[in-house]
Amino acid sequence: MCARTHDDLASKALQIVEQASAMGLSLRILGGVVIRWYVTVARETYDVLRPVPNDIDLLAPLKSSHAIRKTLTSLGYEPDDRLIAWRGDQRHRYCEASNGGGVYIDVFLGTPPQCHRLELAHALATPGPALPPTLLLLTKLQIASINEKDLIDVGFLLLESPSALTNDGSEASISLGYLADVLRRDWGFHHTALGNLRKLSEKLDSLFPATFRSVVDERINALTRVIQEAPKTLRWKVRSKVGTRWQWYQDVEEVVR
């Protein structure tokens, strides 16, 4: 397969979203490709530490299978007909034909595979070509078997700017209030998210340069406090009594990386 770079994937993803929009189909970028797009102050470091994603992940509206196929094929991408015939109401896959291989495009209808349910459909109505940072962070924190690539993504989302953690609802920032509200309702998601933040804290020395560690650690602690202190729902409290004696997450074939 041909060599890929972060810039290559970001450019292709943006081109697809823009051209799809012109054809009447609303798409949003998710996964590592777009997290890197949000990283500006430390992008060179991110590019060194974070392996290039294997493909481009996109979110599409439910019941848009026909429009997805029409749009992606018109842009020159070849459909995975077997996958689409089997799961076309949930997921499409396309490949960019080229000498030596090409870029794969995964399009998820309504929501990607998730260990914890996170509603994303409303993001299709938000401005811009990508999921906002708050939702991107939650898509990473919901992964039950998180890996180092995902932890790097979480760390850089928290690192990005002094205003990364806010309560003002800004599209370009991570909303503490929104995060806390999602997690205070779902004990399983809450448990997984806090566990992933602990894993990131434990791996800071091995994953991040010394210049960034203190800032990321400070923001992990700030986010953890908000999540822990948010008033929990009755449903959360009831499920917490069972704890990990019952599996608290869904097994999925794959998660967005």
Image (cartoon, helix red, strand yellow):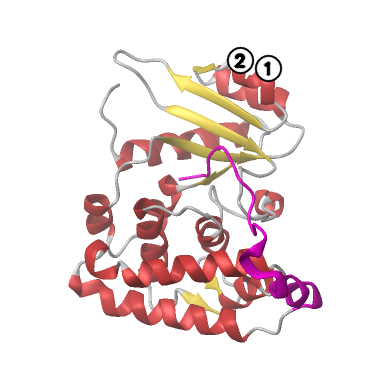
Q: Which is more toward the observer, 178 or 85? A: 85
Between 92 and 146, which is closer to the camera in this rendering?
146
Q: Name the residue under label 1.
A: 85
Identify the disc placed on residue 82: 2
Quadrant of the snapshot with the N terminus: top left
Q: Is residue 251 magenta?
A: yes
Image coordinates of residue 64 in percent, x first then y, are 73, 31
For the C terminus, the quadrant is top left
Q: Give the x, y percent position of residue 190.
A: 61, 69
Q: Position of residue 36 (x, y in %)?
A: 37, 52
The CA distance from mark 1 to mark 2 is: 5 Å
Q: Which of 192 and 25 is in front in this view?
A: 192
- The residue stretch that appears in magenta: 233-257
Residue 136 visible to the viewer: yes
Dot 1 crowding, Cα within 10 Å, few <14, some 14–19, many 20+: few
Kindly check if marks 1 and 2 are in contact, taking CB atoms under 8 A apart as contact: yes
Tag 2: amino acid = Arg
Q: For this view, does 255 lie left or right of residue 25?
A: left
SS for callout 1? helix
Q: Is residue 163 left or right of residue 48?
A: right
The residue lying at 46 percent from left, 65 percent from top is: 196
Circle 1: residue type: Ala
Quarter of the image for residue 151 reads bottom left
Secondary structure at badge 2 equals helix
